[in-house]
Amino acid sequence: MGSLKSEIRTMIIGGGKAGSILLEEILNAKNSPYDGDKNAAAFEPVCIIDNDPEKLGSEIQGVKVLGGTSDIQRLAEEMAVDQIVLAIPSLSESDRKKIIDICNETKLPLKIIPFIGSLILDSNSTLLEQVRDINFEELLGRDPIKFDNEEIRSFISGKRCMVTGGGGSIGSELVRQIAKYDPAQVIIVDIYENNAYEIQQELAMEYGNKLNLITLIASVRDYARMSQIFKKFEPQIVFHAAAHKHVPLMEVSPMEAIKNNVMGTLYTASLAQAYGTEKFVMISTDKAVNPTNVMGASKRCCEMIVQYLAQQHDGATEFVTTRFGNVLGSNGSVIPLFKRQIEKGGPVTVTHPDIIRYFMTIPEAVSLVMEAAAIASGSEIFVLDMGEPVKIVTLAENLIRQYGKSPYRDIDIQFTGLRPGEKIKEELLMNEEGLGKTSNRLIFIGHQTEIDMDTFAQRLEELKFAAEKNDDEVAIRALHKMVPTFTTPEEFNEKELRDKQLQISGK
């Protein structure tokens, strides 16, 4: 097949039906200049990769099968490949991830055909039109998490559901998913009116008058206002997503993390208990485990408050905490930042070459919250099996390749140093927490230790007083006293890096 200068030399992975159809469409489009796909000229197939030994050496649509997936790196160099197309829509998520990892070693742009369930299979759509860049969801290395929709439906249907922080990344997705399960009422509570307005308008367009939606501007820090809301609407289920979440910002304003996260949780959870809410669902973070920053320590306080109220057995409210890692595409996550940096020509900034994080998609995180709430009986911390953690620098490199650029050559990556309070890696469980199974094989229960009721109440009062003084040092001292596992990032990171060096040296 002759190669034009403008054509991109392409390796096709997959010599099955999809790969054959794709090659046929490329050839047909090239040979039909009037009605062919104008993008076909961008593809010049030069070799096929397939693990079936019987196909090795054969030709498909005039293109030779030259090797299996273990040969990708070698053949990419020998055949001067410019891009790779993964054309096996029936692959499992884990197998796809393995092949994507091999392809990423070539440092070439990678495109894929969607999963078989996502393909548009009709006479108006070609396979070539559906070739697309990979999504970061496909780099997480595990199968998409499945949840029991019927269990969630029976839990939500006919209930009055309140979501604090309902305009945020997690909160707005909670509202979207709740709306699907026929709730009696959805109450959005948020202090930021722009976000609250956006999700209100989105749901109004989708559901019209079918959804009983109340949107309220209010702060969880205002006990009187929150009491007014609970009294008027009597929510049966409360999802508490309101929180300050930006680690560096909370390092310089620790009193605000205490006022908003800690006291906001205390007020909202206490009011839920007082007004007979059936379930109160606290949304936490892996940064609450052995925290090295104010934000994480404040969220650990929130978890302790929920446990404290659960231990009181005062009223009918069941309290549950859900804990998960970073979410892709959330406000303040690395992906939008990296995209802006790439679009400006770089550099992409990563804090440390060894930094790793657990990731999940926003819908997955919210589905965890929903199912945890449905199966909870009170006092649990639910933890998701999030697969293997992801290196942030690898995430940056892959995103640069999605833009058709080469990391470090076209777009530089610069390491800026760990930010205040930042860990090299996050954890999902504290040492004292064991794991119990649930009906979902990817959701586990972390068993909490008992809280000393008298000591906790006293320290909580001291913490509130410290925050109200607006004194950084006093607030941080009170937070350390409240959360014994709160340590400095220097201590944690030095130990992690030292342990890593010992592993490398084999000692």
Image (cartoon, rainbow, N blue to C red):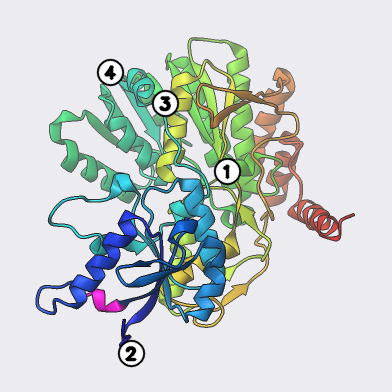
Q: Residue furthest left?
A: 34
Q: Earlier in the sequence, mark 3 or mark 2?
A: 2
Residue highlighted by disc 4? 158
Marker disc for residue 5: 2
Residue highlighted by disc 1? 387
Residue highlighted by disc 3? 238
- Front-most of residues 459 and 239: 239
User: Marks 2 and 4, how far apart in space?
Assistant: 63 Å
Mark 2 and mark 4 in contact? Answer it, CB < 8 Å: no
Q: Nearer the viewer, mark 1 or mark 3?
A: 1
Q: Earlier in the sequence, mark 4 or mark 3?
A: 4
Mark 1 and mark 4 in contact? Answer it, CB < 8 Å: no
Q: Helix, strand or loop at disc 3?
A: strand
Q: Earlier in the sequence, mark 2 or mark 4?
A: 2
Q: Helix, strand or loop at disc 4?
A: loop
- Magenta region: which residues? 38-42
| Residue for point 70% across, 18% down | 453
Q: Label 2: few (<14), some or many (≥20) within 10 Å? A: few
